[in-house]
Amino acid sequence: MTRSFKRFTRWMLLCSTLAGAPYALAECTPANQFETITPGVLTVAAYVFPPYSIPGPNNQLSGVDGEIIKRIAERECLKVKTMVVDTAAVVQAVVAKRADVGIGDWYRTAERSKALGLSAPLYLDVMGIISDEGYTKISELDGKRIGTVQGYLWVDDLKKAFGDNLVLYPNPVAMAQDLASRRIQVGADSFAVAVSSQQKGGYPGKSIKVSEPDQRVKATLEPGQSAFPYTKANAALGEALSKNIQALHASGEIAEILASFGLDREAAKVGEPRMIQ
């Protein structure tokens, strides 16, 4: 084989490789058409909030919300870029168009919808009761010192129901410490968050039960629907998110993701979309 023929063969192989590269990329067809801040990339604002949002090193992302958004990105032929921020900064990042979407158990509320787009509901966030006795009813908490975490839907109703017997905490860790030292007798937190904490060694020996419906606490009758907040002006992105979420519900994948984190599949039965007023 002559040198010139060898060079020609190598040149042909190189051309073939280069020609095949864009073809390989073209094999992925997005389910929908919309723009993102960076073409080909879905920028996700996330904070540490297991089991919903679990950002990790090297742009890794997990948690219920994390797994759902990764599947959506895959369906849309997008890479995921994770922006790890504090809780309050998630909304700011989305509003300021530094992130396309936020994750971390964000309720669909009328007030929030004024500044943000909100996707179709992902799952229900139900109230859990943490106790030694295995309480499931609000009536069983009468006369007891109760703790709960600021920011949840049930806080105002619990204040009305229990008055000075309710203690508010800035985060679940502070509440868990007082529960362990018996400064409070019962805790009320997101069932999923409490279960996730117990899986990692928190609440040793405690029972965590979903609260039964009670007229005094509306969130036990109509749990909050969680969603992905997105940049309000990007209506096409919002429509794509919602279509993908509906498809993932229909396939049973969201229920499977919830179960993979030790949560109840029933939380995927979100019902019709609604806003918390």
Image (cartoon, rainbow, N blue to C red):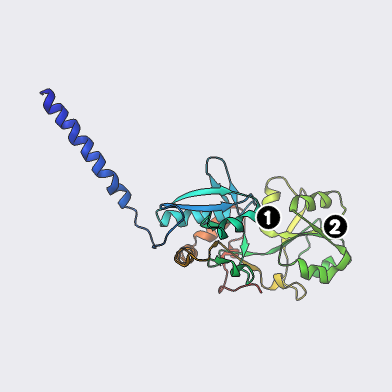
Residue 209, percent from left and from top: 72, 61
Residue at 59% from the left image edge and 74% from the top image edge: 274
- Residue 19: x and y in percent read 24, 43
Depicted 168 relative to depicted 83: above or below:
below
Residue farthest toward the bottom in the current orientation of the protein: 215
Front residue of this view, candidates 264 and 111: 111
Judged from the image, the secondary structure of the residue bearing numbered disc 2 is: loop
Relative to 132, is 123 on the left or the right?
A: left
The crowd level at tag 2 (other Cα within 10 Å; few <14, some 14-19, many 20+) is some
Q: Determine the residue positioned at 66% across, 56% down.
A: 88
Near-viewer residue (186 or 69):
69
Tell me the kind of residue under disc 2.
Answer: Gln
Q: Quadrant of the N terminus?
A: top left
172 or 95, nearer to the observer: 95
- The numbered dot on residue 185 is 2
Q: Return the disc, 2 or 1, that comes first in the chain's sequence.
A: 2
- Residue beneath label 1, please? 193
Residue type highlighted by circle 1? Val
Tell me if residue 260 can be seen.
no
Q: Residue at x 30, y 47 (%)?
A: 24
Q: Does residue 149 appear left or right of residue 245 in this picture?
A: right
Q: Quadrant of residue 8?
A: top left
